[in-house]
Image (tube, rainbow, N blue to C red):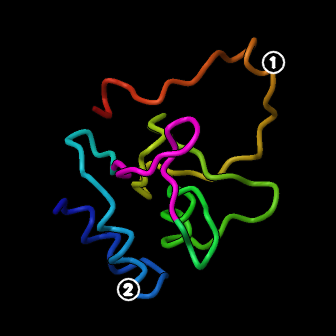
Amino acid sequence: MPAVLQHYGAGWRGAAGDVLAFRHRVAYSPSGCWLWRPPLGFGGYGITTWRTRQVRAHVVAYALVNGWPPAGRQVRHMCRESSCVNPGHLVLAPVLPTGPEWMAEHGERTNATAECI
């Protein structure tokens, strides 16, 4: 178990059972990414059921440490690995536009980088 996991263990806001169930679904990579085990949804994002609704796993990871993101903000990956749920790799950012114009300017995201494999 990574040492950083011990650090986050004390700060997680979820009930003990929620946190344990969540951690059971994580594989730890040498890069520091905590990779969500399947199921993965569109774009390679981890999917989980949280209190009867389906949500992205990285949002739950962020919420367990920091609380749920406020309206108009979204949880983004600094590591650019869609399946990563390491709270240290997640930040709040404004909701970004999407669509053909955004893709033309910024290009497609990849699901994995060499650092996260």
Query: Which of the two labelled residues, at mark 1 and mark 2, occupies the earlier sequence position?
Result: 2
Residue at 79%, 30% in the rendered image: 98
- Whether 21 is drawn above or below 70: the answer is below
* Residue behind mark 2: 17
Q: Where is residue 91 in the image (x, y as percent from the top left)?
A: 57, 51
| Image quadrant where one finds the N terminus | bottom left
Query: What residue is drawn where x is 61% and y is 64%?
Result: 54
- The quarter holding residue 41 reads top right
| Vertical position of residue 12 compared to residue 38: above or below | below
Q: Residue 68 location in percent, x, y? A: 65, 70
Residue 104 percent across, percent down from the top left? 75, 12
Whether 24 is drawn above or below 76: the answer is below
Pointers 1 and 2 in contact (C-beta within 8 Å): no
Q: Name which residue type carries label 2.
A: Gly
Between the C-alphas of marks 1 and 2, the distance is 42 Å
* Image quadrant in which you'd find residue 33: top left
Q: Is residue 5 left or right of residue 66?
A: left
Which residues are drawn in magenta? 35-48
Residue 76: mark in rendering: none
73 relative to 67 in the view: left or right: right
**Which amino acid, mark 1?**
Pro
Dot 1 falls on a residue whose secondary structure is helix
How dense is the environment of label 2, judged by Cα within 10 Å: few (below 14), some, or many (20 and up)? Answer: few
Relative to 25, 60 lies left or right: right
Q: Which residue lies furthest to the left in this view?
A: 1
- Kindly identify the residue that appears in the image at 56 percent across and 69 percent down: 63
Residue 62: x and y in percent read: 53, 63
Q: Which residue corresponds to mark 1? A: 100
In depth, the one of 4 and 29 nearer the eye is 29
